[in-house]
Image (tube, rainbow, N blue to C red):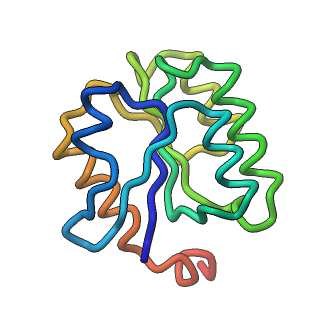
Amino acid sequence: MKTALLVARGPCVSSAVCDVITPGGVRIVCARDCAQAARDLERGALRPRVVLIDLARVGEGAARELLERLRTDRRLRRTPVVVLADRPAAPEVVDLVVAEGALGALPNDLEDWRLVQVVDRLCATDRRASLAR
């Protein structure tokens, strides 16, 4: 089953979004912080098709560290990452996205149903086909 990892989304939102299956059959799994996400990824418990990181909840340093870990892991280096931020177009967010090779940034107050749509669409593409391009 395709999996998406959502890191540090707000508690009331997490319960609504996490451990659900999207219409496209993607299971969304939550980690309460970057440390838990890193442990789950290192153990091999997860191999997500996409990772979403709520920057406001984890902080720039922790997000950067998790992104660096993803980019140095042979299995996960090409995994798309989306940063959720208070101000997605802020220079520091754009710098983080560009420096760490994230796919982009979205507002962290994105409605749950829209977040599920984003995850579903990002996971719908065939990873092997996108790597061949």
41 horizontally vs 22: left or right: right
Q: Position of residue 87 (x, y in %)?
A: 40, 17
111 horizontally vs 83: left or right: left
Which residue is located at x 68 percent, y 25 percent?
62
Q: Quadrant of the C terminus?
A: bottom right
Q: How many marks?
A: 0
Quick check: 131 above or below 105?
A: below
Which residue is located at x 76 percent, y 51 percent?
71
Which residue is located at x 48 percent, y 19 percent?
57
* Of 25 and 85, the residue lying toward us: 25
107 horizontally vs 62: left or right: left
Quick check: 119 above or below 62?
A: below
Q: Quadrant of residue 34?
A: top right
Q: Position of residue 76 (x, y in %)?
A: 69, 61
Q: Quadrant of residue 14?
A: top left
Quick check: 124 above or below 8?
A: below
Which residue is located at x 55 percent, y 55 percent?
80
Q: Quadrant of the N terminus?
A: bottom left
